[in-house]
Amino acid sequence: MYRIDWQPDESSPLPLYLQIKTYMKRKIENGEWPVGSRIPTQRQLAEALGVNRSTVVTALQELIADGLLEGDGRRGTKVVNNPWSLLTSRTPPDWDSYVQAGWHRPNLPTIQTINETEFQAGMIRLSTGEPSPALYPQPLLGEVFGRLASRIHTLGYEEPRGLLPLREQLSRHLQSLGIPASPASILIVSGALQALQLISLGLVKPGATMITESPSYLHSLHVFHSAGVRLAGLEMDSEGIRIRGLSELKPQPNRMLYTIPSFHNPTGIVMSERRRVELLRECERLQLPVIEDDVYRELWLDAPPPPPLKARDPSGLVLYLGSVSKTVSPGLRTGWITGPEPVIRRLADLKMQTDYGSSSLSQWALTEWFERGFHEEHLNRVRIVLRQRRDDVLDMLQKHLSGVAVWRVPAGGFYIWLRIVPPISMNALFTRALQEGILFNPGTVYDSLGGPYIRLSYSFESADRLNFGLRKLAGLIRELSSRPR
């Protein structure tokens, strides 16, 4: 749903359509809607402004008559002038052509809608993959930040790899996972997403292939696509990525494998110990580097997952990604890459070219966080809360969606991968749910051929809101399935 940070005043003596006309004219005058750009559709404007569509149409007709807008049939309405260009002969730049020319591809329309809608007040977010505000460790972080004033003597830029005391703490943390990593082999990044961006720009040639699980979180990102990298998906089973498809590959330069072996996003699958051994063996045979995205590892609920792939990697085949976004706070924007030192030097140099280093304040805070042993203390609480949330949601699913969806019980992480049984349009379900104030991530954002799936998260919303949302979703599925096809 399109969002606008202004609303017409129904108590004003000025008619609503004139208020809307004035608002839109100001957007054009200020250059926020530049010449050549397409404005939101009539339906989007009416919904965002809370008015009848006819009111919006009247405002648009006035602006068209003033020479500022031009109707373009099915392609919508475009800004063709601004008040200043009408008074002079100067033509402003065609920003729309610049927008189309950028090399980094835009998100899929569905993902854009999700990103724009999830912060809308009252929206029930069934798929949001972050910890609930109730899990925010306010007392512990209060202690951390309270101690920083006496510890930090400067907030200047850090060295290319990141703050050394934090990398020393992470070296100890990784050692506890069975990963021998010196501070020199660790790079601090602004979350795992930036790690993938750096890898796509610094290690992979355009035209190369990134092998992923199918479905995969990577399929919802255009990071690699925009760098000219092709994605090739391999099917999964209950033990993780299937090795058979990998075994049929021949060695090929500049190709990599991306995997989320622990509490996979979006399916929640945990790669078995046996499969991890087989996967590494095949990757060693193919000389195929591995990107191991392990940001969910510590969120186990029933038992810890098998050791990371990186813990079995004496040859430096694996680049290991970690983050505190899923465990402590996404707002800290801090993650790390562990790998061979030449690779870390290359990626550190590239990071310095793009943002000159992650937040010093966040890095000092996390140094204190790990030094004081708060990480394990916090994780113990998080696991208790998430375990109860998962069990509650499983009860809700059984109550509301039994017969219209099937699912696996996740052993950790945030997600339950729902398969919708009735043969309905997932796009229609997505649209109807939005109209009812319910937002979910359809399976197609993780795999273009993803089929009738929904990624459900039990980590963010409260139990009451989840129960209401799932009951409403079940009703919409039954409503759509009852329509003649």
Image (tube, rainbow, N blue to C red):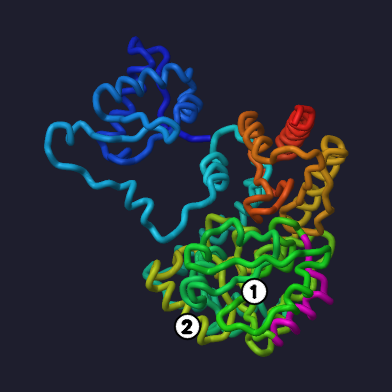
Can residue 455 be seen by looking at this rendering?
Answer: yes
Residue 177 appears in which quarter of the rendering? bottom right
Decide which of 119, 196 is in the foreground and name it: 196
Side of 184 where 67 appears, left or right: left
Question: Distance of mark 2 from mark 1, alpha carbons?
Answer: 21 Å
The residue singled out by tag 2 in the image is: 345
Amino acid carrying mark 2 in the image = Arg
The structure residue drawn at horizontal position 62% and vertical position 80%, both measured from the top left corner, is 289
The structure residue drawn at horizontal position 51% and vertical position 76%, both measured from the top left corner, is 204
* Majority SS type along the magenta span: helix
* Helix, strand or loop status at disc 1: strand
The structure residue drawn at horizontal position 74% and vertical position 78%, both measured from the top left corner, is 248
The structure residue drawn at horizontal position 21% and vertical position 43%, both measured from the top left corner, is 92
The residue singled out by tag 1 in the image is: 257
* Helix, strand or loop status at disc 2: helix
Q: Residue 267 at what x, y percent from top left?
A: 74, 57
Q: How many marks?
A: 2
Decide which of 351, 484 is in the foreground and name it: 484
Q: What residue span does the magenta drawing correspond to?
A: 269-285
Q: Residue furthest left?
A: 88
